[in-house]
């Protein structure tokens, strides 16, 4: 037996990255491709390569240098694990990666162009890593929004299909009033679409400030040329497909905290859906079921179980997201001086984990929404459990004004007395007891049997539920329609 706990030389500490063994919600090829160590490495190299192209175009690097740097910046040339270990020497991965990149550029510069002059000139490590993480975030959010819009399209379809499907509303865990599943799905849609809009509106700014955020080195570099430091910054943003920043933001972390807030809000909306499905799919409730898939929901001990795993995974991510977003704010509030110390370092894992969890959860909630099984008969069965008592509020509103005072009691008080007496009966007898006592309290001259039965019809006391659902869908037309199908980035699949 060798290595820690018998893991031998293949222990995780020597591997190429975390596979997500204890984070199944985000363990997928797509999440790894967009947020894993190799994605971060590729983003750092893309920044360095993009910068070389900017310098060459501005006449500040030798002609042909950018092509050499681009070839040297092929991620497959570098070991993530080796760079991670060596990052301890300078406190960030850019420093050891730069050393390796410069060696690769020197080896590939067979024409002696001086291509090394295009590598990292006038940049600082934070410029590169901040910009690289914005690239990672942009790519991840783009994929996340694709899943989110498919989710909202599926929820909109559920809302429309079940506009008149009766179910019971619940308040503080108890039955409250008649409801519709269409409105419930519309409310899921509203939460998700409302969170999706800020996420879709985010900017992902490039970072360029130099060693202390003054662009001093860039000012010297551009002296005597047509280029300016600000022009170079904007050109880098354009080269990478990021937003141009009006100024360096080394210690102003709104770009990061705004991203964290938007992701946390999306996870709140996902968590609400998952929590509802977990309850409504309990066997004793049985109103919903997750889509079936081979091998999903199995138990290691109980062969009959069909666990709602999609909802479990989504909820697990939703419960982690707020703390990660809070960590981003904690870091931002402690970015000292003009370039920060440890607060910056605590930002990286929190941001990446939040991105990974959000993207992983988005795929699961999309599958959940698109394949959700709805059981209207079970919804009606549960609605009927409370019997006519569920309509007590509606009865009071419709009938109390018709009743004259009796024994010093107003109409409202008389009807409350009926409810109080009903609740003293055993649960199985309450429906019949309420009907009997209500009929006794309301003279036939005030309301006929037919009129009373109409008031006790759950469908008669839905308020504006259908219109509320319609207004919700109309408020977010950009999220109600199914987006065109596209392929996963880099050929990755969720697996």
Image (cartoon, rainbow, N blue to C red):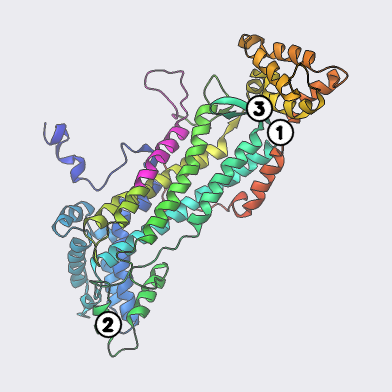
Q: Residues within 10 Å of mark 3 (few under 14, many from 20)?
A: some
Between the C-alphas of marks 2 and 3, the distance is 69 Å
Between disc 1 and disc 3, the foreground one is: 1
Give 452 or 472, whichever is nearer the viewer: 452
Residue at 49% from the left image edge and 31% from the top image edge: 293
Between the C-alphas of marks 1 and 2, the distance is 68 Å
Residue bearing the label numbered 2:
219
Q: Can residue 488 be seen? A: no
Region rendered in magenta: 295-324
Residue 341: image location, x then y, percent: 21, 59
Residue bearing the label numbered 1:
462
Element carrying mark 3: helix
Between the C-alphas of marks 1 and 3, the distance is 16 Å
Element carrying mark 1: loop
Element carrying mark 2: helix
Asked if the residue under mark 3 is in contact with the one under mark 2, i.e. CB atoms within 8 Å, the reply is no
Q: Residues within 10 Å of mark 2 (few under 14, many from 20)?
A: some
Give 135 or 200, whichever is nearer the viewer: 200
Residue at 78% from the left image edge and 18% from the top image edge: 406
How many numbered discs sit on the rendered protein?
Answer: 3
Residue 454: image location, x then y, percent: 80, 24
Up/down of 421 relative to 405, above or below: above
């Amino acid at each position: 037996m060798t290595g820690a706990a018998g893991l031998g030389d293949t222990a995780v500490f020597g591997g190429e990255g975390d596979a997500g063994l204890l984070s199944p919600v985000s363990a997928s090829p797509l999440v790894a491709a967009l947020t894993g160590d190799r994605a971060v490495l590729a983003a750092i190299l893309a920044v360095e390569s993009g910068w070389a192209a900017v310098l060459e175009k501005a006449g500040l690097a030798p002609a042909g240098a950018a092509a050499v740097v681009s070839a040297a910046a092929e991620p497959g040339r570098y070991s993530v694990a080796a760079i991670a270990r060596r990052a301890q020497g300078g406190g960030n991965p850019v420093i050891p990666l730069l050393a390796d990149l410069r060696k690769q550029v020197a080896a590939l510069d067979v024409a002696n162009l001086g291509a090394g002059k295009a590598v990292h000139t006038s940049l600082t490590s934070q410029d590169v890593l901040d910009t690289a993480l914005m690239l990672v975030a942009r790519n991840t959010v783009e994929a996340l929004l694709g899943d989110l819009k498919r989710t909202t399209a599926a929820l909109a379809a559920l809302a429309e299909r079940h506009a008149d499907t009766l179910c019971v509303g619940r308040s503080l865990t108890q039955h409250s009033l008649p409801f519709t599943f269409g409105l419930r799905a519309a409310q899921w849609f509203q939460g998700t679409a409302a969170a999706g809009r800020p996420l879709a509106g985010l900017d992902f700014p490039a970072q360029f400030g130099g060693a202390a955020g003054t662009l001093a080195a860039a000012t010297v570099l551009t002296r005597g040329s047509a280029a300016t430091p600000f022009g170079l910054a904007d050109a880098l943003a354009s080269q990478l497909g990021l937003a141009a920043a009006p100024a360096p933001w080394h210690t102003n972390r709104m770009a990061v905290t705004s991203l964290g807030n938007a992701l946390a809000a999306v996870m709140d909306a996902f968590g609400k859906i998952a929590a509802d499905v977990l309850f409504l799919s309990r066997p004793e409730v049985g109103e919903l079921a997750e889509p079936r898939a081979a091998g999903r929901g199995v138990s290691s001990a109980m062969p009959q179980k069909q666990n709602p795993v999609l909802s479990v995974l989504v909820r697990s991510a939703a419960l982690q997201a707020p703390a990660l977003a809070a960590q981003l704010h904690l870091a931002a509030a402690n970015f000292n001086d003009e370039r920060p110390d440890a607060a910056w370092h605590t930002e990286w894992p929190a941001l990446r984990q939040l991105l990974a969890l959000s993207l992983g959860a988005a795929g699961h909630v999309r599958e959940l929404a698109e394949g959700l099984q709805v059981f209207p008969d079970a919804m009606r069965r549960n609605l009927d459990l409370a019997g006519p008592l569920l309509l007590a509020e509606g009865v009071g509103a419709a009938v109390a004004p018709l009743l004259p005072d009796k024994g010093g009691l107003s109409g409202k008080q008389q009807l409350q007395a009926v409810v109080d007496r009903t609740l003293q009966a055993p649960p199985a007898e309450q429906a019949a007891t309420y009907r009997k006592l209500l009929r006794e309290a309301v003279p036939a001259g005030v309301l006929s049997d037919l009129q009373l039965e109409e008031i006790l019809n759950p469908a008669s006391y839905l308020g504006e539920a259908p219109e509320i659902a319609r207004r919700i869908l109309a408020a977010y037309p950009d999220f109600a329609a199914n987006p065109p199908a596209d392929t996963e980035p880099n050929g990755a699949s969720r697996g």
